[in-house]
Amino acid sequence: MRKSLQVTSLPGYEEEIGRWLWCLEDVRRILLKEITGISQSTLDTKRDGRQTIGSLLYHIALVEADWLYVEVLGTEWDPKIESLFPYNVRSENGSLIHIEAQSIEEHFYRLNKVREVFLSHFRSMDLKDWRKLRTVEKYDVSPEWVVYHLIEHESHHRGQIFQLLRELREV
């Protein structure tokens, strides 16, 4: 069967915005497909001083929520979303905190809930607002750049997760 490799637009969005959001969703789809059904041990294993898969999943969701509320919306976090993150993302030395004993279902729920809220805020956005700079303390940023950054961010951590999965399967 011949594949058709193309970017499409998520329905319900301005077409160009929907294309970027499709890319964001595609990165997540591939990640979730690969980690579906992994064991608790695999989620929690820390290898060679690197982060666990669970820690990286927590980090991915937290960063996405933070960029939404701080940079795109410029508002306080929704308490329901904030409650999904009982731990600070970084330890005192600046490294990601170690997350363990959270099931894959808990990680999926967090990732999916944050994404659902994230996408909902782009449904009514037009291209002018998509490119409008928001001013935060250290820089100006557009929602367009935020989505680009989140695609890059999750892709980077997805690669780390996939590498760790390969190594753990070899053991």
Image (cartoon, rainbow, N blue to C red):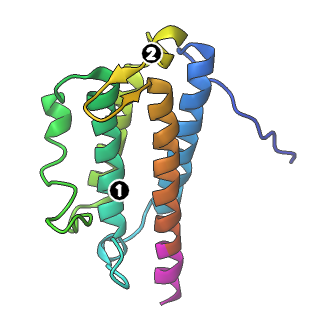
Please tell me whether the stretch drawn in magenta is mainly helix, strand or loop.
helix
Residue to which mark 1 is pinned: 57
Badge 1 element: helix
User: Can I make out residue 10 in this image?
Assistant: no
- Is label 1 in contact with label 2 (beta carbons under 8 Å)? no
Residue to which mark 2 is pinned: 132
Stretch in magenta: 164-171
**Amino acid on which disc 1 is placed:** Leu
Give residue 50's quadrant in the image. bottom left
Q: Which of 21/35 is in front? A: 21
Residue at image point 46% right, 41% down: 150
Residue at image point 35% right, 21% down: 134
Q: Can you say whether 23 is above or below 89 in the image?
A: above
Q: Is residue 10 left or right of residue 130?
A: right
Q: Given this view, does label 1 or label 2 mark the residue nearer the observer? A: 2
Q: Which of 81/107 is in front? A: 81
Badge 2 element: loop
View extreme (right): residue: 2
Residue at image point 19% right, 44% down: 84
Q: Is residue 164 left or right of residue 108?
A: right
Whether residue 78 appears in magenta in the rendering, the answer is no
Q: Can you say whether 16 is above or below 38 in the image?
A: above
**Badge 1 density bin: few <14, some 14–19, many ≥20, Cα 10 Å:** many
